[in-house]
Amino acid sequence: MPSHIPFKDSLKDFLVEVGELSYFTGRFFKEALKPPYEFGEFIRQSYFIGYNSLPLVGITGFIMGVVFTLQTRPTLEELGAVAWMPNMIGISIIREIGPVLTALICAGKIGSGIGAELGSMRVTEQIEAMEVSGTNPFKYLVVTRVLAATFTLPILVVLGDTVSVFGSFLVENMKGAVSFHLYFNKMFEALEFGDLMPATVKSFFFGLVIGLVGCYKGYNSDKGTEGVGRAANSAVVIASLLIFLVDFLAVVMADIFYEL
Amino acid sequence: MNPVEHITSSGSTTELKSGKPVLELRNLYKSFGGNKVLNGFNLSLYEGENLVVVGKSGSGKTVMIKCIVGLVEIDNGIVNVFGRNIIGMGQEEMDELRTEIGFLFQGSALYDSMTVRENLEFPWRRHKKKMGSELSINALVHEALESVGLAHTVDMMPSELSGGMKRRIALARTLILKPKIILYDEPTSGLDPITSKEIILLMLNIQKKYNTSALIITHDMDCARVISNRMIILVDGINYAEGTFDELIQVSDPKVKAFFK
């Protein structure tokens, strides 16, 4: 029997990674609650993360709304159900597609940005320089970025959803001459509190996941420029996977909750 | 027999070597996996002294100074700073002690998202209570930048500075907290000979002005000659030889001689 089993090594690496990420998450909550609080840096990071992602989230949201409506319209026309378009768009985008797509875009933009920034700070000894000056770099760099990602992502999701629905309305207006008032009335008729609440709550968790994974990968990056690239890349891959996992759990839990 | 026993010169190493050391490493051990980097290393730094540690690349010099500020955890031994053992020290106490120790990194380690002023203010803002009122920060920044001759760079970003300027700014940043000990990790590496000389002179001026003790890690023998009161040659994780520059240059041991070629 060969002494070296690749599957065993991969499993071990995976479990080590899960353990380290869990420890990192625990440390984040511990440090976040303990004073002093870095409010200035939190505001600065919220501005960078939120403001810099606005155009990307807006453009992709608009395209998604337009494409989704254009693709669905023929089928609904065949079934004679084109009047249900605003209801369907509202529920599908606000409940599911909007938050997940915005989170995936932000995983690419914010997660990789944080991973690369902290990774290069590690490589150039800037994190160590903070430590030797008697500053807690975890609190200053990690806590502020994770909190900023957690609180700005729901705002970005709301913006993405709004632009997306507006894109859908434009298509409906051009193809079916539906008025603004009628379109949005029909859409909001279909939406309930039960549609908005889980979508908002899970957006916070998406932000938390993106911030935590980006910081974890960057903060623990290997030495060298290759390590920085790897940190940025794996931050995106792991955060994207975890977004789907969180989404799955959120949908299952919401389902159980509303059945009860 | 430990080589240091027969290579250390006979008593007259330096006039500064008196009183209690401000920094003391005793029997320091550190391994990375199977690689023993420090193998019972000893060092004493006295007040006002410039102690230079030379060794080949990868001999554990940087690991050794990182152990002093708790950036690297040691396997065994004692690290005494101002008579306090840092091993097992709590985070708050350690952060407090770190304000007494300046650290100049080999690559300068300036925060590249901050201006020069913000770089200098950063450590001060974290230790405001200890350092005094808000009003003094402008004066402190100005004084530190004046000390390194770069007062005009105050609003520049690190990316706009040359390698030598970055090293000077990093040195100014260490001065903000008024440290009593400065640890220099290869202060002249990667610099041209003229800039290296400027940095060495600057280190001497700073010692005079701020009355600091300095531990300098280098393999630049010109730097060691000019700046050292005493030298330690680190080979195989131990202090292989110890003495003044003039004493060590006369030692016939091939491992010591190799450094002076």
Image (spheres, rainbow, N blue to C red):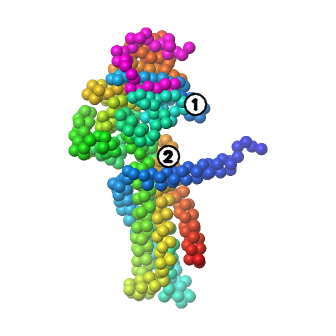
Q: Three-letter amino acid code at disc 1?
A: Asn
Can you say whether B207 is above or below A18 in the image? above
Query: How far apart in space, not on screen, are marks 1 and 2 (Cα)?
Result: 22 Å
Determine the main secondary structure of the stretch shown in magenta.
loop
Residue A76 on image: x %, y %? 53, 85
Depth check, front residue: A84 or A150: A150
Q: Which residue is mark 2?
A: A221
Q: Three-letter amino acid code at disc 2?
A: Ser
Q: Which residue is mark 1?
A: B35
Is residue A39 at least partly visible in the picture?
Answer: yes
Quarter of the picture holding the N terminus of chain A: top right
Local secondary structure at mark 2: loop
Can you say whether A145 is above or below B178 in the image? below
Residue farthest bottom in this picture: A80
Please give the name of the residue rendered at 35% of the width and 23% of the height, measured from the top-left corner. Answer: B47
The region drawn magenta spans: B1-28
Please give the name of the residue rendered at 31% of the width and 40% of the height, measured from the top-left corner. Answer: B130
Residue A244 on image: x %, y %? 55, 64
Q: Which disc is residue A229 wearing?
A: none
Number of disc labels:
2
Task: Chain letter for mark 1, please.
Answer: B
Left or right: residue A255 compared with residue A51: right
Residue B193 on image: x %, y %? 34, 26
Task: Chain letter for mark 2, please.
Answer: A
Is residue B10 a member of the stretch shown in magenta?
A: yes
Quarter of the picture holding the C terminus of chain A: bottom right
